[in-house]
């Protein structure tokens, strides 16, 4: 095979539709740490940015942390089917705008979603074959509580509420494609990398294969 043929083949292999990678877990299982590491290792990946009706905090930036919009605009976008998923949390609404995600996928970028099981259910209805759902479990309930205390971000009351909520969240594990038990972070990351690599290689996501095989059959 000539050098040009090798180059063309490598170029063809870069032509694929992106993945929607959902990561869900109870608070304290390590999802945020794993998400940050996955994004750092994959320049081709983008973090999904949600729209919200709540005011921006001092440290947050428009388009970086959230798209900050009013309730009227949110309602109009919802009614026009411009969200892949949305939910009301207390008095504010959150949703994933459809257009930037679909544009990224079409350009071959993988998009990572840090959402709960309810958001994952909505994405399942909206996204079809683009979606890969991964649930991260702690090795034990005791370890989960220890991690929540260790990170020192929440009061004892908040930790108690998070622990109570974790049981309901974990009960939805069977709705996901893959389960990772985060006992050791590097082992868990290796499993996450393997899942992403395998999903990228699935035939239906390799748009270049059709023309390539056609060329093989025609003797090119």
Image: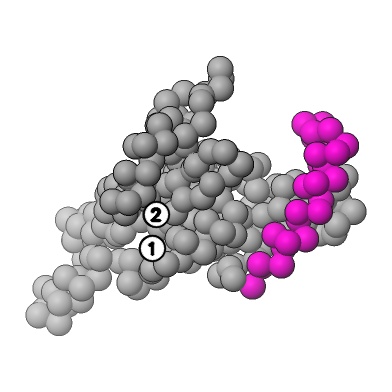
Q: How many residues crowd around disc 1 within 10 Å: few (fewer than 14), some, or many (20 or more)?
A: some
Q: CA distance from mark 1 to mark 2?
A: 6 Å
Q: Which residue is mark 1?
A: 126
Residues at marks 1 and 2 touching, judged by CB atoms closer than 8 Å = yes
Q: Is residue 5 at all visible to an observer of this figure?
A: yes
Eyeballing the image, is 133 above or below 39? below
Query: Left or right: 91 with respect to 173?
Result: left
Residue, x 33% and y 66% (percent of image)?
A: 205
Q: Secondary structure at mark 2?
A: strand
Query: Left or right: 179 with respect to 22?
Result: right
Camera-nearest residue between 105 and 70: 70
- Rendered location of residue 82, percent (x, y): 32, 49
Query: Left or right: 146 with respect to 93?
Result: right
Eyeballing the image, is 116 above or below 209? above
Q: Which mark is residue 65?
A: none
Q: Which residue is mark 2?
A: 84
Eyeballing the image, is 107 above or below 43? below
Q: Secondary structure at mark 1?
A: helix
- Rendered location of residue 146, percent (x, y): 88, 45
- Rendered location of residue 14, percent (x, y): 29, 55
Residue, x 47% and y 37% (percent of image)?
A: 52
Q: Which residues are magenta?
A: 148-174
């Amino acid at each position: 095979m000539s050098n040009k043929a090798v180059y063309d083949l490598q170029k063809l292999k870069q032509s694929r539709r992106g993945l929607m990678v959902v990561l869900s877990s109870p608070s304290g299982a390590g999802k945020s740490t794993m998400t940050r590491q996955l994004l750092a290792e994959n320049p081709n990946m983008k973090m999904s940015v949600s729209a919200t009706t709540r005011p921006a905090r001092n440290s947050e930036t428009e388009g970086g942390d959230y798209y900050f919009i009013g309730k009227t605009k949110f309602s109009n976008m919802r009614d026009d089917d411009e969200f892949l998923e949305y939910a009301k949390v207390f008095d504010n609404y959150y949703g994933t705008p459809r257009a930037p995600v679909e544009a990224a996928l079409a350009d071959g970028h993988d998009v990572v979603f840090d959402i709960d099981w309810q958001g994952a259910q909505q994405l399942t209805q909206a996204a079809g074959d683009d979606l890969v759902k991964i649930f991260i479990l702690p090795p034990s309930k005791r370890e989960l509580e220890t991690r929540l205390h260790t990170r020192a971000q929440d009061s004892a009351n908040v930790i108690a509420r998070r622990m109570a909520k974790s049981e309901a969240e974990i009960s939805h594990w069977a709705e996901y494609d893959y389960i990772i038990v985060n006992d050791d972070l590097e082992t868990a990351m290796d499993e996450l990398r393997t899942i992403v690599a395998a999903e990228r290689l699935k035939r239906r996501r390799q748009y270049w294969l059709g023309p390539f095989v056609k060329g093989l059959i025609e003797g090119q």
